[in-house]
Amino acid sequence: MKRGRLPLTALRSFESAGRHLSFSRAAEELFVSQAAISRQIRELETFLHRPLFIRHHRRVALTEAGERLLSQLVQSFDAIDGLLADLIATPAQSVVRVSVEPSLAACWLVPRLNGFREKWPGIDISLDVDPRLVEFRGGQPELALRFSARDTSWPRTEAEWLSPVIDSPILSPGLLGSGQALSEPADLRRYTLLHEENRQGWARWFEAAGVDDDVPVRGPLLADAALSKQAAMLGHGVALGDLLLVRDELTAGRMIKPFDTNVECGAYWLVARSLADLSEPALAFADWIRAEFAESRRYLEEFR
């Protein structure tokens, strides 16, 4: 029989009447009239082509067919009731929305997310990759991971310092092998320099490295650190890499850091409307992100 033809309302009425052996008590349980119960059961008997009740003057009794149907319905309804109770008792999958700087998301956070999933399998992460600071209104992310070169706070939010941002030149082994030797910082003037957003980063680095004259200002201008890192890995030039974001590549030898000079150019921050009033999923993520950044800071200590 197709399930679309199952007389579910009538079966519900019959199960209650059969369990109580009373049409009036079934009507009370289901909040309908006794006449509605009687009609539903008559329709069910017509559907089955057999009686389900023996009707006496002041009471009813089940027929053999009625006994069989009631036994199956009671088991089925009890099983459904138990499953619904379990589903109600089991919390729904939790989701925490996090707004993240594009480069930080692509190069640092996403490679680590499986670690959070292993620790908190009941919490899903929804990443909003956007460089703009959210206002934490309804329907927006509850947490944000932000880079700032100067700011340490933002209006109507709380911010917690996570890590410094330390820049240093990086390039691919292939480019270094095929290009001019890099004996001193001034030798970088012979290479294509990859710039991010503006050209001030390289100017600061050359100043820190003691190169004051003939500082190159030409070269591709890329939107963020992730694109700059990718271009450098492809051998398109030398990037001023955020050491936090290129750690794996430096460790594996896929990128080279030719000089010891490093420039601290800002910091990463954990931002929320109120860090003391987070939901449980957001609090779990915030604690995890603090631990991950603590480990990253230990790596950066050797460059400070």
Image: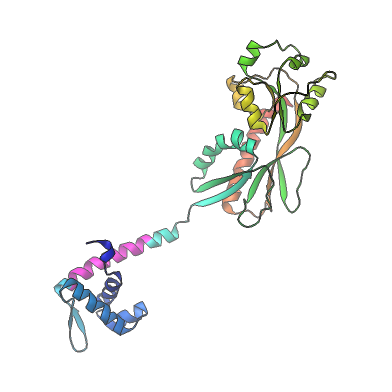
* Residue in view at x 75 percent, y 23 percent: 218
Q: Is residue 45 above or below residue 233?
A: below
* Image quadrant occupied by the N terminus: bottom left
Q: Nearer the viewer, residue 150 or 260?
A: 150
- Left/right placement of residue 3 relative to residue 153 reads left
**Percent coordinates x, y for residue 200 in the rendering:** 78, 30
How many marks the image carries: the answer is: 0
Q: Is residue 246 visible?
A: no
Q: How is the image coloured?
A: rainbow
**Percent coordinates x, y for residue 207 in the rendering:** 82, 23
Q: Nearer the viewer, residue 259 or 238?
A: 238
The chief SS type of the magenta part is: helix
Tell me which corner region of the image, top left, top right, bottom left or bottom right, holds residue 262. Answer: top right
Q: Is residue 290 above or below residue 198?
A: below
Q: Nearer the viewer, residue 274 or 232?
A: 232
Q: Is residue 74 magenta?
A: yes
Q: Residue furthest right?
A: 213
* Image quadrant occupied by the C terminus: top right
Tell me which corner region of the image, top left, top right, bottom left or bottom right, holds residue 101. Answer: top right
Q: Is residue 148 visible?
A: yes
* Residue in view at x 24 percent, y 79 percent: 21
The magenta segment is: 66-83
**Percent coordinates x, y for residue 255 in the rendering:** 62, 21
Q: Is residue 105 above or below residue 255?
A: below
Q: Is residue 224 magenta?
A: no
Q: Residue furthest bottom?
A: 57
Q: Is residue 177 above or below residue 55?
A: above
* Residue in view at x 40 percent, y 62 percent: 85
